[in-house]
Amino acid sequence: MKEKELRRSLAVLPIGTVMKLANLTARQIRYYEEQDLIHPERNAGNRRMFSLNDVDRLLEIKDYLADGINMAGIKEIYAMQKQKAQQKEADLARPLTDNDVRRILHDEFLNIGGLKAKDGPEYPTH
Amino acid sequence: MKEKELRRSLAVLPIGTVMKLANLTARQIRYYEEQDLIHPERNAGNRRMFSLNDVDRLLEIKDYLADGINMAGIKEIYAMQKQKAQQKEADLARPLTDNDVRRILHDEFLNIGGLKAKDGPEYPTH
DNA sequence: AAATGATGTGATATTTTCTTACATGAATGA
DNA sequence: TCATTCATGTAAGAAAATATCACATCATTT
């Protein structure tokens, strides 16, 4: 479903529509943007244009706030989600080759032997 | 998928967005509305608000025009489609009950006998 | 009590959209 | 060929939507 994802990320909604869909004031929406929780695009005339994904996120933010989580907390949540997504992306991008595996095992054996010169072992040898 | 249908029929897009999505001028879009080919909603401030279905229809209209069909032709096409849809709806809405069938047969027998007083038979008895 | 966080409100500028009217160029029929 | 009609362009002026910025407010935290 790549098509669907594209549709959902198209910036087509003006703030007035988003206010109604998410039941938020313009002030709130702009503030959440200021806090880097959403990143609506801008059209040629500097008007914010939102995607359906943006609306979803606004609804999420609303829920988090209702649960007593503050901006900082929400920001952290999204930062973590982003990290996870990036890790997954990286994992998917280049699955380990046999060569990678061999190299990793080789390095580990070096470490186990305590022979690694430059930085010393990564774990206590006690 | 009633949900999807609802989403597609939500009037959330301003004309500026629709212009880009359908690659049409505001003039064209308003003219097609004037010709009763589309019926965007209006918001409290009298601005036209379009649904994704509206955009689809605009793209269709564009195709028809490109095929050399004029407004009158397109209008007729949509009129026919509407009729078909209404018929289908009517058919689906209330399939005939046994009672309906009995009543219809009863009436038909009356007619066959040529006894129907008021309007006379519905078909030539010749 | 002072500071902070989330939101409301008001002022003013800019952009978008509306309606109305007139212009235009291609196709069509007399 | 000339006048019409059709689909669209364009301009003017008004109204609505949105932008930013500043200050107000009210609850919570320190």
Image (spheres, coloured by chain):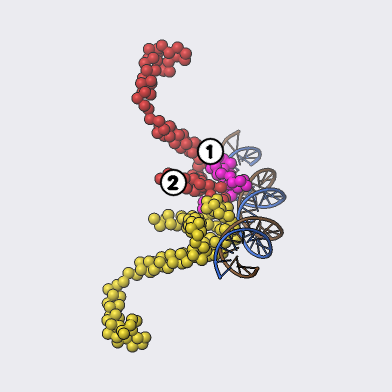
Chain colours: A yellow, B red, C brown, D blue
**Chain letter for mark 1:** B
Residue B87 sits in which quadrant?
top left
Q: Name the quarter where the C terminus of chain A is drawn.
A: bottom left
Task: Based on the picture, tell me whether residue B87 belongs to the magenta stretch.
Answer: no
Residue B64: % across, % down: 49, 44
Q: Is residue B100 above or below residue A91?
A: above
Assign a secondary structure to mark 2.
helix
Q: Which is nearer the eye, D8 or B13?
A: B13
Crowd class of label 1 (few under 14; some 14 to 19; many from 20; radius 10 Å) = few
Q: Name the quarter where the N terminus of chain A is drawn.
A: bottom left
Residue A12: % across, % down: 52, 55
Task: Based on the picture, tell me whether residue B36 belongs to the magenta stretch.
Answer: yes
**Chain letter for mark 2:** B
User: What residue is shown with label 1?
Assistant: B72
**Image position of C22 (left or right of B54):** right
User: What residue is shown with label 2?
Assistant: B3
- Magenta region: which residues? B21-48
